[in-house]
Image: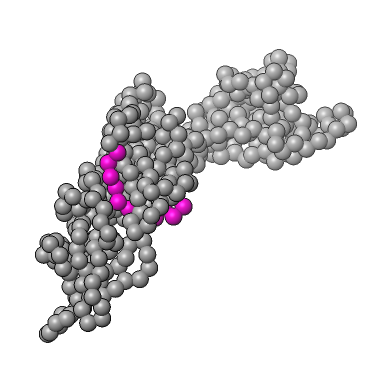
Amino acid sequence: MFESRLNWFAAAIGGLLLAQGCGVMDPGAARDRESGLGSQSAAVVADGQGYFTAERDARRCAWPRCGGYFVKRVNESLTRCADGTLKPSCYVVAITQTEEVANGAVIRGVLRTEVFGSFGVFGLLEVQESWTPFSVDTAPTAGKFYQVFDSGIRCIRAPCFSLTAALLNAPGQVVLSGLTGKLAEKAYEGLRTGKIVVNGLLQGRDAKRLLRVQQLYLPGASAPSGRLCAEYTTSDGRFYAKNFLAAQQAEAEEWIRLDPQVTAAGIGATPCAQANAKTCPAEDPSVCGIPVKTDTPEDFASLCEFRKVIREAAGIDGESKGRFTDGICPEVCALAILDAPPTNSPTVYTKNFLNREQAEQWLSNTFPEATSRELEDGNCAAQPDCFVELYAPVCGTIRDEAPHTYQAPCHFLAEVMHDAGKTGESKGYYSFGRCALWD
């Protein structure tokens, strides 16, 4: 049992510490191996949810610093921008809507921040609903922005308060007996298809309250995704999925081209987490997959099912990846340990097998002089971690990686097995004491 081997390591450490007269604990010396992608997800700007107007950025400089939009909260003099400052309007690098955003459009959405590589943090406006201006003249007026809808009330005589107007970005609403102004007729036509947005002035009082329409905005796209999902598979069994903004088609294509081992790739017009509607073919062969999110081997009915898990982990604005091999996951973990001599330093070999017969043959034929040869059911990555708290550092090297200081020999052993769980097999060697040149 590997537990007994870990206990053997613990006993050896205890003897070593007694001989040296020390017993210092250093939990921070344990290795911290990152398995994530290091991506930053978008964050909502304070007061970032509400209604905005959007105007195209006409400045002449390179994207993403220019070429986006200037947005401002309607019915308010200042807007909180991505950098936290309050300004009359804020620059955003993109508006996440699959259709072209009309100049002067009214948008219900969420203002977020997102990191654009070395360019830094920029704002982007994530659309939930949008309204397109009926007129090309979107110059500011003295009116306020209202969302107007038909309440369904019908009367046998006037005035009939059948309309409701809600002031945008503010609480409360008023009932109206009608609309007036040059655009009133078009506004009534728009009400037949749903809620409209009006910039206008309230007129009259209790007996007859009207809204004079100065600018009319008709419903546009509702809750578009505004994201692309780029994904690819490689010849060595890797699968990647990453979300891009709708305006970043070229960046998504370049991301795929950067990997020389791509064998299949695609870019979809929805976020990755929403690209899993298609049913996987029942006849596809099974695979052993290791999603980076769990870093644990799992059996999947097909490569298609494995890809769905990776897309789901990527979500709507992130990325994820994983590795896979054909067939079911290995079921036996074999471990061989050679103490010095015959090797120059204690050396660990570990490998996954489909059955015990193969594992036993590998151990006996390859390591006849091993100090310890052991088998354990399950993948090597699923074996127990080391829980020794005493600090007896060793300098360990796993495969061809740089040497690293581990808290104790059993921590090093657990890391070698963990590495084998991801790639099939692994090896490493160590010496007592910290790595003087690398840590």
Q: Nearer the viewer, residue 253 or 414?
A: 253
Image quadrant in which the C terminus is located: top right
Return the x and y of residue 66 as percentages of the image width and height: 34, 34
Q: Is residue 97 above or below residue 201?
A: above
Return the x and y of residue 358 as percentages of the image width and height: 51, 28
Location of residue 334 (image quadrant): top right
Asked if the magenta segment contains residue 54, the reply would be yes
Return the x and y of residue 404 as percentages of the image width and height: 65, 25
Residue at the image position 23 percent from the left and 50 percent from the top: 139
Colouring: one colour
Which secondary structure dominates the residues rendered in magenta? Answer: strand
Q: Quick check: 328 left or right of 366?
A: left
Q: How many marks?
A: 0
Return the x and y of residue 289 as percentages of the image width and height: 43, 37
Residue at the image position 16 percent from the left and 68 percent from the top: 180
Image quadrant in which the N terminus is located: top right
State which region is magenta: 44-57
Q: Is residue 237 above or below residue 125?
A: above
Residue at the image position 47 percent from the left and 46 percent from the top: 85
Residue 251 in view in this figure: no
Location of residue 205 (image quadrant): bottom left
